[in-house]
């Protein structure tokens, strides 16, 4: 079950990868016309509407993306299956259809059904999961010769449409209960104000090792429980509490951590590393630090120490919560379409709902100093095995650093036991996810010399932290493993 939830988290990265496009389009549009939001410029209106079309359709993107991402062969037919399932489900659960099926007036239909549309990510995820399961099970079924045209992949959308009728009937009774439960959870946190933002920030980081932070994010960033912080921010829809806008309070506090705090941590790792490892650690930290500062991709940095020094990672999660609490308390607001890096900060800084975003830079510089001082003190005080301070490995053989994705894939294949030991190859944002026959054949020490780290979440599972270019390495590895 745990592994399956991780797979869903990985599949969510497919539709989430669309968000930067929306952020760029809308960000440039708002830069052109920050006061009229497109009313004073046709170019701005074009860009804002184009970006908004993606934000407003996240539900259908999630259905298609998750169905594709969780399919066994990631075939386009799986994406089509997700689309078919989403169209059937959302049509049958629309307020008009529910009113007709239950013989009630549209005004009496529970408000929950008004949230089932192209923008509902929860419905999209549900449809994507079901559709991918149906695809994996029926995509190779052969029918009688008279019906052979509908065999295999052509059969799956037909089955999916039929299954979604049953799912729609079930959700007609369960969806209001489920929706109200999600709203209650979200509003209970929202009701805590800045403290709730801090609690969310803490758990956001704490769930990264198991890949479940995406599920938590969907409650606060999208229109799953009525919060829709990300969507409202980019659409310019203010949510007022005591006369102050709070839209963006679940995003702003991440910028000081991702753009600056983790840079302080990187400096601490370099400072406390062993002299013989300092040159190597410096190059690794520069690369990981650039990724987190410029794009907001933090996994290469976080995975470099979360398992070597879990106590230090807990401190990181706590500091993230504190950052969100401070930013929300002071109403310093900025937003992102992908992650809290420099690109999103620049694009969002002139959006209508951005408020004193430059103060997040000031806060970030302070947090960079805090991270550096706290991490340096903790590492030296308790002699933590952070990057560059690990115990000496028995294997002292030098490994020449690969210069291409193909070379990296060849070395990884060798170090995980070769083709005979490799069962499955997959990837997510920064991690190579492998299934092997015998985990004992995996040479951790050598893999760590060419990547950012190795994780073994299960008896046959191996995750290798490669970085943002992991997809290219995975593609080359799949070619070699054929």
Image (tube, grey):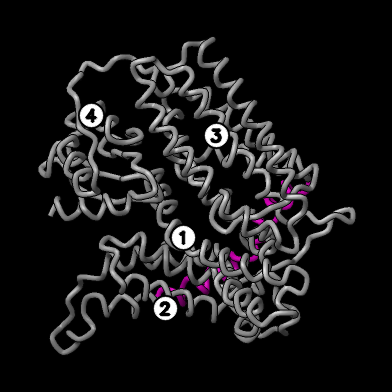
Q: Earlier in the sequence, mark 3 or mark 4?
A: 3
Q: Earlier in the sequence, mark 1 or mark 3?
A: 1
- Front-most of residues 71 and 197: 197
Indicate which disc residue 17 carries.
1
Q: Which residue is at a point 70% across and 83% down the rendered structure image?
A: 104
Q: Is residue 194 above or below residue 86?
A: above
Q: Earlier in the sequence, mark 2 or mark 1?
A: 1
Task: Give the residue at mark 2.
Answer: 84
Q: Secondary structure at mark 4?
A: helix
Task: Give the residue at mark 3.
Answer: 262
Q: Secondary structure at mark 1?
A: loop
Q: Which residues are magenta?
A: 163-191
Name the mark nearer the viewer: 2 or 4: 4
CA gap, disc 2 and disc 1: 22 Å
Indicate which disc residue 321 carries.
none
Rendered location of residue 455, percent (x, y) = 34, 34
Is residue 94 a member of the stretch shown in magenta?
A: no
- Contact between labelled residues 1 and 2, with CB atoms less than 8 Å apart: no
CA gap, disc 1 and disc 3: 23 Å
- Front-most of residues 460 and 476: 476
Main SS class of the magenta portion in the image: helix
- Apparent side of residue 392 relative to residue 145 in the rendered image (left or right): right
Is residue 167 a member of the stretch shown in magenta?
A: yes
CA gap, disc 1 and disc 4: 31 Å
Name the mark nearer the viewer: 3 or 2: 3
The local crowd at label 4, few if under 14, some if 14 to 19, many if 20 or more residues have their Cα within 10 Å, is many
CA gap, disc 2 and disc 4: 46 Å
């Amino acid at each position: 079950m745990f592994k399956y939830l991780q797979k869903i988290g990985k599949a969510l990265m497919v539709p989430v990868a669309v968000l930067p496009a929306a952020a760029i389009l809308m960000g440039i549009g708002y830069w052109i016309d920050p006061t009229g939001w497109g009313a004073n410029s046709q170019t701005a209106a074009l860009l804002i509407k184009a970006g908004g079309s993606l934000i407003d359709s996240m539900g259908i993107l999630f259905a298609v993306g998750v169905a594709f991402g969780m399919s066994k062969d990631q075939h386009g037919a799986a994406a089509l299956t997700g689309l078919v399932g989403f169209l059937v489900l959302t049509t049958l659960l629309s307020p008009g259809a529910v009113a007709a099926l239950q013989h009630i007036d549209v005004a009496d239909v529970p408000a929950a059904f008004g949230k089932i549309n192209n923008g509902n990510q929860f419905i999209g995820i549900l449809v994507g999961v079901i559709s991918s399961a149906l695809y994996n099970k029926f995509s190779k079924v052969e029918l009688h010769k008279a019906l052979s045209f509908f065999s295999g992949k052509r059969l799956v959308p037909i089955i999916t449409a039929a299954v979604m009728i049953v799912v729609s009937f079930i959700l007609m009774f369960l969806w209001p209960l489920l929706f109200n439960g999600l709203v209650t959870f979200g509003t209970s946190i929202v009701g805590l104000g800045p403290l709730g933002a801090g609690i969310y920030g803490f758990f956001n980081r704490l769930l990264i090792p198991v890949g479940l932070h995406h599920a938590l994010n969907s409650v606060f960033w999208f229109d799953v429980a009525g919060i829709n912080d990300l969507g409202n921010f980019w659409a310019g829809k203010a949510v007022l509490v005591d006369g102050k806008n709070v839209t963006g309070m679940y995003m702003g506090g991440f910028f000081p951590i991702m753009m600056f705090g983790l840079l302080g941590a990187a400096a601490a790792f370099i400072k406390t590393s062993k002299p013989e490892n300092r040159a190597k650690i410096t190059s690794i930290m520069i690369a990981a630090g650039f990724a987190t500062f410029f794009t907001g991709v933090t996994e290469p940095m976080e995975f470099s120490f979360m398992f070597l020094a879990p106590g230090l990672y807990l401190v990181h999660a706590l500091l993230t919560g504190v950052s969100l609490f401070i930013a929300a308390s002071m109403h310093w607001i900025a937003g992102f379409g992908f992650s809290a890096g420099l690109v999103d900060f620049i694009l969002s800084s002139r959006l209508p709902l951005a408020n004193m975003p430059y103060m997040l830079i000031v806060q970030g510089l302070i947090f960079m100093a805090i991270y550096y001082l706290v991490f340096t003190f903790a590492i030296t005080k308790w002699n933590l095995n952070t990057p560059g301070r690990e115990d000496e490995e028995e294997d002292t053989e030098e490994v020449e650093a690969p210069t291409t994705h193909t070379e990296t894939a060849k070395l990884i294949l060798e170090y995980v036991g070769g083709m005979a030991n490799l069962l499955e190859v997959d990837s997510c944002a920064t991690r190579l996810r492998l299934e092997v026959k015998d985990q004992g054949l995996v040479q951790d020490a050598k893999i760590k010399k060419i990547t950012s780290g190795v994780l073994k979440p299960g008896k046959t599972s191996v995750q290798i932290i490669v970085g943002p270019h992991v997809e290219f390495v995975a593609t080359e590895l799949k070619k070699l493993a054929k």
